Image (cartoon, helix red, strand yellow):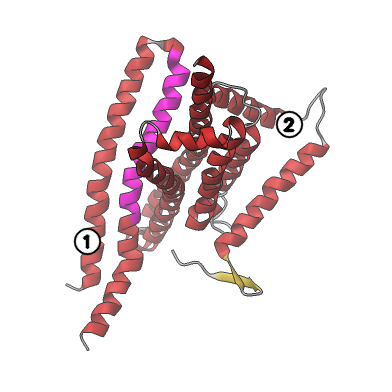
Amino acid sequence: MTIEMIAIVVAGITIAIGSVGPALGEARVAASAMEAIARQPDMAGTITRTMFVSLAMIESTAIYCLLISMMLMFKLGPLFETAAETAAP
Amino acid sequence: MENPVVFNIGPVPVTQALFATWCMTAVVLAAAGVLRLRLRAENPCWAQRIVEMILDWLGDEIEAIVNRDARPFIPLIASLFLFIFVSNLSSLVSPLIPGFTPPTSDITATAALATVVFLAVPLYGVTMSGPIRYMKTYIEPTVVMLPMNVISELSRTLALAVRLFGNIFSGEILFMVILSLIPYVVNEAVVLTVVPLAFQFFIMFLSLITGAIQAYIFAILATVYIGGAVKTGERKKEEEAAQ
């Protein structure tokens, strides 16, 4: 198992775990917003806007995980490879 | 991930993403210029109606957030929104044009947009509530919170850039991954080729929605940040007037 393979496996684990948390969080936010709109339809505009902003905030956690996994796959994997090659002649 | 250089202007290399950003800016500017020439108060053309509708709606949104006249904010927020919206929508045509990727799927473009917001926050804060009152918002509620306020200012700029980039870039990646699946499927059964192609259609539809929502979110977050700087300044002004 080369270091590049490990990097790819870790990238998969990263995005898998990193997307579960935000998904649950966003589901809660959406459910609460629905409930709030059902209770107070007059405030639908404000609630929707606030919901979008908070969804974006929560989503950025998943985006960070995505970035890390992409770095592992595209950047760090080959980087590790060359480092391993130079370290072990 | 790699960013091929198209050509050099002196010592500065112009990458593909930068060139795409320029093209997109030119498209938006040209559309704005043509519309400007055809502005009419009576019997406006359909394009003018659409743009007026968007600007009206954005103005209402901004007014609801900052609780004051939206007019000083509209130029910045609306141009941010329109540019991001058009570049996100260009992800639909990017597979057709070789070497073209949407500008917002590159971290440099989104970082530049986030930097604009980062600079606009103190600019609006200072012009609307004075430099001293604006600087005071950094030591709210106590002086101990100064580093926290500075860090939050920086981290939210980073988050703004990374959020837009990540969303659009992940759409592009998904598109490419599904495209690369087609040869494997063709080897098994030609009929199954329909499956990735149909899936591709849904992915494009999804990226359309994501692009629109991300443009909206970027504009709204920029408004919230600027409105925060302006509003805290305003509150200080009211407190001093009350004393």
**Residue position marked by numbered label 1 in the rendering:** A9
Query: In the image as oriented, which residue stretches furthest toward the front?
Result: B243
**Residue position marked by numbered label 2 in the rendering:** B48
Q: Quadrant of the N terminus of chain B?
A: bottom left
Question: For this rendering, which residue is in front, B42 or A68?
Answer: A68
Question: For this rendering, which residue is in front, B158 or B58?
Answer: B158
Which image quadrant is residue B38 in?
A: top right
Q: Is residue B24 above or below residue B226?
A: below
Label 2 – label 1 distance at C-alpha: 52 Å
> Looking at the image, do the residues carrying marks 2 and 1 touch, with CB atoms under 8 Å apart?
no
Q: Position of residue B234 (x, y in %)?
A: 53, 25
How many residues crowd around disc 1 within 10 Å: few (fewer than 14), some, or many (20 or more)?
A: some
Q: Is residue B41 left or right of residue B166?
A: right
Q: Is residue A59 above or below residue A65?
A: above
Q: Is residue A88 above or below residue B63?
A: below
Q: Which residues are magenta?
A: A43-67
Question: For this rendering, which residue is in front, B166 or B135?
Answer: B135
